[in-house]
Amino acid sequence: MKDFKGKTAFVTGGASGIGLGMSKCFLKEGMNVVIADLSDEHRELAREALAPYRAQTHFLKLDVADRGQMAAAAAETEERFGKVHVLCNNAGVSSPIPMDEASFADWDWILGVNLQGVINGIVSFLPSLKRHGEGGHIVNTASIAGLVPAPAWGGIYSTSKFAVYGLSGSLRLSVGKYGIGVSVLCPGATKSNVRQSEKLRPAKYASAERAPYAMPSLQQIGVEPESLGERVVQAIRGNEFHIIAHAENKAHVQAFVEEMLQAFPQETITDEGRMSYIHWFDQATAEALALQRGLVG
């Protein structure tokens, strides 16, 4: 997708951090942007910051883990701006809860937002992207923690982001035939409010009180969200799958992948059944990738 002007993007978690960075960049490209966010405070601050784009923006309150709310958001978006061409499943939460101490409530809350929220966005918006026939793009926000495991305090978050990464890769192999591209955004330390997520935890997912885990504030050490927004626009134009903008994390990912590759056995496969299966898998993957690559002209 190369032409942005006059088209519509829907961005979850769009009122702060990376979501706001993407929203700003889409607006600069001449898009209409629906900014969906659960935080009343963040929506109001974003509304003020984006006042010059008042005619191009629409704000709505959304809990991405709620399927009914997501479906209603999809309908409201089409009613306000018409066809949706870009879907950014960006909303995410984290909590420094060691995964070996986590309760069901902890798991349900974080996976509900970070993984089920992405699924809800896809199920609610993809049918219309396919139906209007003009193509489009889906950007799912994973994390560097979706490429290399985080320690115990980030274990639930890392679990959700690994799932988003795998989901995005398979989705990419599924929707090229509809002219729809897919990217997975894997940020490292970025200036955002993700470490203040506990403020938005629903009462039904209340967790036992724990001593806070000391972590550096991303507001001081992270990169600017708008720089990631610019990379997202670039990736959509070029139909890039991976969006990775943090060079400092390359060594971590490389070490993890190299350890994985070293685990493969050194053997020559002669079994016809195994070979026929891998041939079928490779052919299906190659055909799907060819459709995706054909979107870049």
Image (cartoon, grey):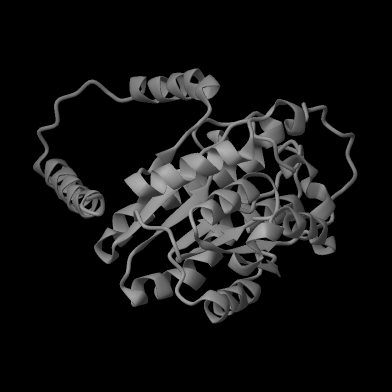
In the rendering, at what x and y percent does residue 222 appear? 67, 30
Q: Taking 103 as reference, is 180 above or below it? A: below
In what quadrant of the picture does the N terminus appear? bottom left
Residue at 43 percent of width and 69 percent of height: 126
Residue at 87 percent of width and 34 percent of height: 212
Q: Residue furthest front?
A: 52
Q: Is residue 72 visible?
A: yes
Horizontal side, residue 184 vs residue 195: left or right = left
Q: Is residue 185 visible?
A: no
Looking at this view, is 12 or 35 the one in front?
A: 35
Horizontal side, residue 1 vs residue 186: left or right = left
Looking at this view, is 27 or 289 the one in front?
A: 27
- The part of the image, by quadrant, that contains residue 176 is bottom left
In the rendering, at what x and y percent does residue 238 appear? 33, 45
Residue at 74 percent of width and 36 percent of height: 98
Q: Taking 64 as reference, is 228 above or below it? A: above
Residue at 34 percent of width and 53 percent of height: 2
In the rendering, at what x and y percent does residue 50 appear? 69, 56
In the rendering, at what x and y percent does residue 54 appear? 66, 65
Q: Taking 258 as reference, is 103 above or below it? A: below
Looking at this view, is 288 or 139 the one in front?
A: 139
- The part of the image, by quadrant, that contains residue 89 is bottom right
Please tell me how many numbered marks the rendered image carries: 0
